[in-house]
Image (cartoon, helix red, strand yellow):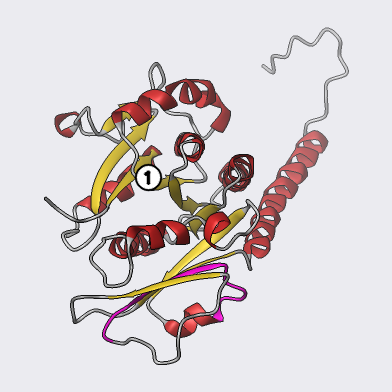
Amino acid sequence: MSNKNRVTIYGCGGTGISLLKRLVRTDLSDFAEVYEGYVDGSRSNANDATIDKDHWYFLEGVDGAGKIRKSNYNVTDRSISDILLRIKPSELNIIIFSGSGGSGSVIGPKIAEALFAQGKAVLFFVVGSTESGKATENTLKTIYSLNDIGKKAGVASVMCFDDNENNSRNEEVNQVMLASLRATLDLYSGQHEGLDSADVLTWARPVIGAEIPAQLTLLDITNSREDAEDIEAPISVAELYGDDKPLNGTIKADYNTYGQRNTRGKDSLYYVIYTNGLDKLLAGLNEKLSEFESRRASRERMSKSTIPASSDSEDDGMHL
């Protein structure tokens, strides 16, 4: 019997499903055991020949959301219990989704809401986008939703976030997300000296370990000690030491846990949960959204001045 820890990973919507598919195709033999689940409001992201009903769940009676987050909210809300019955959670769960779409950005937070109610640890891996006004608005609303559901449940929502901007960084973002996901599975593998599952679960729940108020937090994972130390006022830090174990002690934080790899030939990794810079992230998204809104307002003014309303009461609206 394996003594590895288990992580359930929920890939929600097109982006989440795509990233999870790519993740499980990589070599995960040295990491935590993965139980993957794919949840979507459309079958367009699935290959019918490879669908395993124990790992896939499709919202009933819908076919996508067209980037309108509220369109499938009710059916998502009704489906959460069934989703968790089919794709059973673990003590540590990862939820992957796009913040800019209409399906994953609702499914992911709703799953998390239910997992928080069960006392499970959750890490969010979220891809934002600003290629349009709707995508930017959705990304902002999704981040606010994660903050709200965490506060409501009395937990910290821990979010690993990257922005593909105007669809100009898609593959770069994918690689960052995949590397971060693999690093998280490495941390929670249960194969490291001095780093047991309780240590990692406490790190992942800063309200318990660091004793902070319930709030939204950010997660950065890096193999650079200098980059980790540059993060201002870290809240919860996990350090996994490899061949390049530092000599200057652990990173100062409200909560810190660390362990040593039992195998040689790998570098150290640093997992930092923090809030500094979250305000800058939100301000940047709000600024981009304001630019789209200003452009829309200018377009509407121009349209009105170019084609004034007809004053002829008998005009039937046809211009022949």
Q: Nearer the viewer, residue 38 or 252?
A: 252
**Secondary structure state at the residue bearing disc 1:** helix
Q: Nearer the viewer, residue 222 or 193?
A: 193
Farthest-out residue, bottom: 247
The residue at the point 50 percent across, 40 percent down is 116
The residue at the point 57 percent across, 28 percent down is 70
- Left or right side of 144 for 31: left
The residue at the point 32 percent across, 50 percent down is 19
Farthest-out residue, left: 1
**Res. 312 visible in picture:** yes
Which residue position holds label 1?
Answer: 16
Is residue 238 shown in magenta? Answer: yes
Q: Amino acid at mark 1?
A: Gly
Is residue 83 shown in magenta? Answer: no
Rendering coords of residue 205 (x, y %): 50, 55
| Quadrant the C terminus occupies | top right
The residue at the point 40 percent across, 47 percent down is 96
- Left or right side of 113 for 290: right
Rendering coords of residue 249 (x, y %): 45, 87
Rendering coords of residue 245 (x, y %): 33, 86
In the rendered structure, which segment of residues is drawn in magenta?
230-243
Q: Is residue 141 above or below residue 201?
A: above
**Res. 42 visible in picture:** no
Q: Nearer the viewer, residue 316 or 280?
A: 280
Determine which quarter of the picture holds residue 27. bottom left
Rendering coords of residue 282 (x, y %): 66, 57
Q: Is residue 130 above or below residue 233?
A: above
Few, some or many residues within 10 Å of mark 1 (<14, 14–19, 20+): many
